[in-house]
Amino acid sequence: MRTLLNSSLRFFILIPLLVSLVACSPGITAGLEPFQSTDGRYGFFYPTGWTRIAIQGGPEVVFHDLINSDETLSLVVSDVSPEIELEKIGSPSEVGEKLMNDLLAPNGGEREAELINSNSREVDGHTFYDIEYLIHLPEKDRHELATVIVDHGSLFTFAAGTNDVRWDKVEDLFRRVISSFSFFV
């Protein structure tokens, strides 16, 4: 009987302890704040403590870290034909190469870029291309992650980047940010 009471007592002590540990464990949104477009069409998470800035004629949305100003997050929205699907533009590596050559490191510029990785994922009926780059600038290297999506005649390019020195510290955070982009409508 005493063994049964001790077992029951341990059970009733252990269950609340486990529940509280699970409730306090960091999830995918730990250290992140939500952002939703004014029209409610899309949203994502950005790192806590970052601030939104406006760039005239630039990306639709830009956030940057106040402490490490090299760390940025941006969303560029471009018009495409309404019947265009991402797969028709090319494979993940083809789209990655096109972005790299046209935007990140055009020929004749001071920067060079290398495509490190590209893959495709499906979320809620949307195809996402996740692309990773290393950009060589004259003064330092920069690491960039991007996801590219087509939705209702718009091409969305959502990217996060930092200098290569800080990459190991923020890689997991940036991967969570990039994979958080989603559509609500």
Image: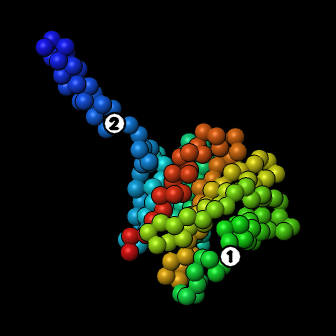
Of all residues, the one furthest to the right in this rendering is: 108
Left or right: where 91 falls relative to 59: right
Left or right: where 154 falls relative to 39: right
The answer to whether residue 25 is above or below residue 54 is: above
Residue displayed at 44% across by 48% down: 28
Say which quarter of the image contains residue 172: top right
The answer to whether residue 96 is above or below residue 138 is: below
Q: Secondary structure at mark 1?
A: loop
Amino acid on which disc 1 is placed: Gly
Say which quarter of the image contains residue 73: bottom right
Left or right: where 42 falls relative to 60: left
Amino acid on which disc 2 is placed: Val
**Sooner in the amino-acid sequence: mark 2 or mark 1:** 2
The picture places residue 121, in percent across and down from the top left corner, at 55, 64
The residue closer to the viewer here, 118 or 82, is: 118
The picture places residue 43, in percent across and down from the top left corner, at 43, 64
How far is mark 2 from mark 1, CA to CA?
Answer: 42 Å
The answer to whether residue 83 is above or below residue 61 is: below
Q: Can you see residue 3?
A: yes
The picture places residue 16, in percent across and down from the top left corner, at 23, 30
Q: Which residue is mark 2?
A: 22
Q: Which residue is mark 1?
A: 90
